Image (cartoon, helix red, strand yellow):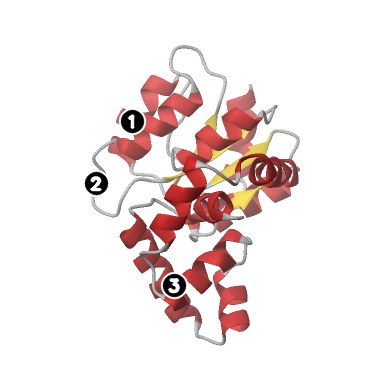
Amino acid sequence: MVRAGLSMILGGAGDIGVVAEAGDGSEVPPLVAEHRPDVVLMDIRMPGVDGLTATERLRAAPAPSGGPPEVVVLTTFHADAQVLRALRAGAAGFLLKDIPPGDLVAAIRRVASGEPILSPAVTRQLIAHVADGGAGERAERARRLLGRLSEREREVALCVGRGRSNAEIAGELYMSVPTVKAHVSRILTKLDLNNRVQVALLVYDAAP
């Protein structure tokens, strides 16, 4: 019933097509290989393989041309460990199931265009994570990785960590949107990361 409702909401958006549905996380990789969607909307609680494990497997699997799809995790709860595990696995978004239908459609569009999306509750979890865990081994590793970047790339990475869009970064740093996209692409390559959310997590970890 939940899948049917989500399919109806997204399919009715006009510019979004629902190409497949899965009732178990183990079904996700073969369906993705067959249909090659741009975005996967992943529930955490599923029978068999859960959504977090499925996300990790999906993002770690050899990707077809164009790379793996972006993953948006949808759940009824937002415990710290689950948020961080999903985002570190490469999820581009983490939304709660009480999100209004229009906001869900907008989130899918945003993720498909390359922008991360987090619910306000999840953002608060990340802020708490920074406050509790900004020092130590993880912070040292994060700072070492960010040290690989040029000064301009670090400026862009910090803006990504603040949740800025490409257009907002362009205005803040006085550069064009294509230049921002090029910087973000180089940052992902240099740091061996999958998406902007992982860049943001690295920036959070490096915070003093």
Residue found 56% across the figure and 66% down from its top = 158
Alpha carbons under labels 1 and 3: distance apart: 33 Å
Question: Which residue is the site of mark 2?
Answer: 64
Residue 10 location (% of width, % of height)? 59, 43
Q: Nearer the viewer, residue 54 or 198?
A: 198
Give, as a three-letter code, the residue at label 1: Pro
Q: Which dot, 2 or 3, sits closer to the camera?
A: 3
- Circle 3 residue: 153
For numbered disc 1, what is the local secondary structure? helix
Going by the numbered disc 3, the residue's amino acid type is Glu
- Near mark 1 (Cα within 10 A), the count class, few <14, some 14-19 or many ≥20, is some
Contact? badges 1 and 2 (CB < 8 Å): no
Q: From the top left corner, tell me how far across and down residue 169 is, in percent.
A: 58, 75
Q: From this viewpoint, is residue 186 visible?
A: yes
Of pointers 1 and 2, the one earlier in the residue sequence = 1
Q: Earlier in the sequence, mark 1 or mark 3?
A: 1
Cα gap from disc 2 to disc 3, whole angstroms: 28 Å
Proximity of marks 1 and 3: CB atoms separated by less than 8 Å: no
- Residue 2: name its quadrant: top right
Residue 29 marker: 1
Dot 3: few (<14), some (14–19), or many (≥20) neighbours within 10 Å?
Answer: some
Element marked by disc 3 = helix
Please, is residue 140 above or below residue 129 in the view?
below
User: In the displayed image of the protein, which residue is found farthest to the front?
Assistant: 136
Q: Judge by depth and name the residue closer to the eye, 79 or 131.
A: 131
